Amino acid sequence: MVIFTLAAAARVPLERLADPTDTTYIPRPDWYFLFLFQTLKFFEGPLEVVGAVILPNLAIACLFLVPFLDRGRVKRITQRGFAMGIVGIAAMGWSGLTAAAVSSTPRKVETSANGEPAVWAHLSPVELAGLGYFRKENCSACHSLGEGGSKIGPDLGSPAIRRDAKWMIAHFKNPQQLVPGSSMPPVRLLDDQLNALAAFALKLTPKNASDLRAAPQAAVEGAMLYQQNRCGACHQINGSGVKLGPSLNGLAQRRDKAWIEGHFADPQKFSPGSVMPPYKFSPRDLGRITSYLLQM
Ligand code: HEC
Ligand code: HEC
């Protein structure tokens, strides 16, 4: 009954979809099967069938035969030395094999040194899109991001920058008006793109600037598409946006690439009754935004 209830009621967590190109993944069964996993290591090549099939089935057959083999009437444990000896040996074998398997499991190689998701993955889509405009508008010709150097404009990663978004946007539109004699050219972008740029600039600290500079361009472009298409009007990522549709964090645990790409073209086909409008992305953009979402 307990197992039945658990199977019906408890949600079984799945790992992310298998990615054959991921060489850091360490395949291991759950703990209760580790002893079998370890047993398999003793049998190589054509002998594998012994460890995989013959031995486990022999053990099960023995359990079935116990009532027929053992006709003794004694029930007291202390007087059943032989039977208890077998139980003890089996228990020791199980623990020993499990311990050996646990100790031989390699430590997982994490993508970043401290096991945390990359720094850029914590940004909201708008902030990450702002990094995209920073790159696209070549702001780095005059501004460094925490790496120092002697460029014409101030280092945007330095703590000296204490402006608010309103000032920044007005400054982007017309630097000379706010800073007379400024050599910074006006930034010709739409209002919400300037907004993204300011959101990104405000997020910069001396600590995160160099990590953010290294954000992969594919994900950055995905965030730009996300921002341009106003997905944030219905979705949340990293807590930013509106919760009309599902939050898109952890999407990789629920959906695969093919599902997400098909869903963009025709949401109703994949989620009947969905209010999400269809999106027609070019194949390149589709790859960008899908890869961005899968990394969130
Ligand atoms: C031709 C060089 C040049 C380019 C290109 C340029 N800037 Fe500037 N920027 C400057 C200079 C010089 C200043 C300092 C004078 C001023 O504040 O206008 C400045 C100031 C700033 C400030 C204000 C810093 C502060 O608080 O004093 C911000 C923010 C800024 N730039 C962001 C950007 C962004 C984002 C881009 C890309 C869209 C960009 N800049 C492109 C030269 C440039
Ligand atoms: C009008 C609101 C709306 C907009 C705009 C919208 N979506 Fe959705 N989206 C939804 C709703 C509602 C669902 C849940 C039903 C479904 O799966 O279609 C959804 C589902 C999804 C899913 C599947 C999530 C899951 O957990 O299964 C993804 C991925 C997604 N949207 C991405 C996007 C992206 C990217 C954009 C912008 C290009 C976007 N959506 C724009 C409403 C919206």
Image (spheres, rainbow, N blue to C red):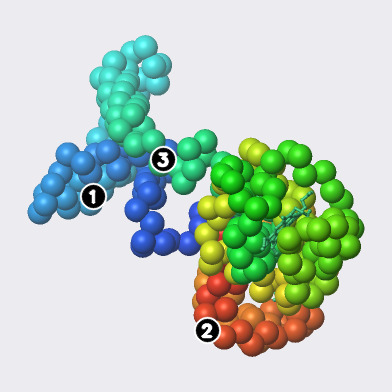
- In the figure, is residue 197 to the left or right of 26? right
Between disc 1 and disc 2, the foreground one is: 2
Judge the density around disc 2: few (<14), some (14-19), many (≥20) Cα neighbours within 10 Å.
few
Task: Specify whether tag 2 is near ligand 2 (CB below 8 Å).
Answer: no
Sooner in the amino-acid sequence: mark 1 or mark 2: 1
Residue type at mark 3: give it.
Lys
Query: Sequence-wise, which precedes: disc 2 or disc 3?
Result: 3
Q: Position of residue 50 (x, y in %)?
A: 16, 48
Q: Position of residue 224 (x, y in %)?
A: 67, 70
The residue at which mark 3 appears reads as 108
Numbered marks: total: 3
Residue 285 versus residue 162: which sits nearer the camera? 162
Task: Provide the secondary structure element on which disc 3 rests.
Answer: loop
Please give the residue where the numbered disc 1 appears in the rendered image: 52
Foreground residue among 52 and 117:
117
Dot 3 and dot 1 residues touching (CB under 8 Å): no
**SS at mark 2 in the image:** helix
Splitting the image into 4 quarters, where does residue 137 fall?
bottom right
In front: 50, or 160? Answer: 160
**Label 2 sits on residue:** 283
Residue at x-position 30% and y-position 43%: 37
